[in-house]
Image: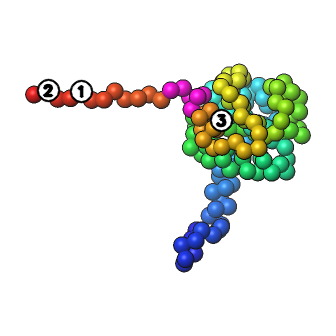
């Protein structure tokens, strides 16, 4: 929403948009890992975070933006370090935040970790999960 000066100001519509985006990145419990990740027909982006982490607060909107773009093609899940410690150990996650790209429960591509994970890196990881884009062949030039 913009005011009369053309400056963006937060409003009720923004809260609804944020809630919808946040719903695309669902919480995952350890007991649901097999059903939600290993048995998933869709590739999975799995984020590990520590509650109250400033790094996660900065990463979450980036992850949500990518989740919005690839909704229905990739499943986005997140695991709290406090409740998913054994899952983090099982997957070799040692720090927070961390983003893993999984297909059938197996890690595909390079995981992302650290303080400042760019949205473009998340997008590149998702595109790696989905495979190369199908490029249409150019139409044949008409012959005279």
Observer-side mark, 3 or 1, equals 1
Q: Is residue 144 left or right of residue 136?
A: left
Q: Which of the two labelled residues, at mark 3 and mark 1, occupies the earlier sequence position?
A: 3
Q: Is disc 3 placed on a helix, strand or loop?
A: strand
The structure residue drawn at horizontal position 63% and vertical position 44%, both measured from the top left corner, is 119
The magenta stretch spans residue 136? no
Q: Is disc 2 placed on a helix, strand or loop?
A: loop
Kindly report the distance in space between the C-alpha atoms of the residues bearing marks 3 and 1. 38 Å
Kindly report the distance in space between the C-alpha atoms of the residues bearing marks 2 and 1. 9 Å
Residue under numbered circle 3: 75
Q: Position of residue 100 (x, y in %)?
A: 72, 31
Looking at the rendered image, the quarter that the N terminus falls into is bottom right
Residue under numbered circle 1: 140
Kindly report the distance in space between the C-alpha atoms of the residues bearing marks 3 and 2. 47 Å
Secondary structure of the magenta portion, mostly?
helix
The residue range painted magenta reads: 127-132
The structure residue drawn at horizontal position 67% and vertical position 61%, both measured from the top left corner, is 15
For residue 107, say whether it is visible: yes
Q: Nearer the viewer, residue 24 or 93?
A: 93
């Amino acid at each position: 929403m913009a005011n009369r000066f053309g400056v963006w100001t937060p409003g009720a519509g923004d809260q609804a948009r944020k809630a919808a985006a946040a719903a695309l990145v669902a919480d995952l419990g350890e007991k649901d890992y097999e059903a939600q990740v290993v048995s998933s027909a869709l590739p999975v982006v799995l984020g590990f975070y520590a509650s109250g982490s400033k790094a996660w607060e900065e990463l979450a909107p980036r992850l949500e933006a990518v989740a919005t773009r690839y909704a229905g093609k990739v499943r986005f899940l997140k695991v709290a370090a406090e409740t998913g410690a054994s899952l983090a150990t099982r997957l070799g996650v040692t720090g927070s935040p961390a983003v893993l790209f999984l297909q059938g429960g197996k890690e595909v591509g390079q995981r992302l970790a650290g303080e400042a994970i760019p949205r473009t890196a998340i997008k590149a990881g998702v595109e790696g999960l989905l495979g190369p884009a199908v490029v249409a062949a150019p139409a044949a030039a008409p012959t005279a």
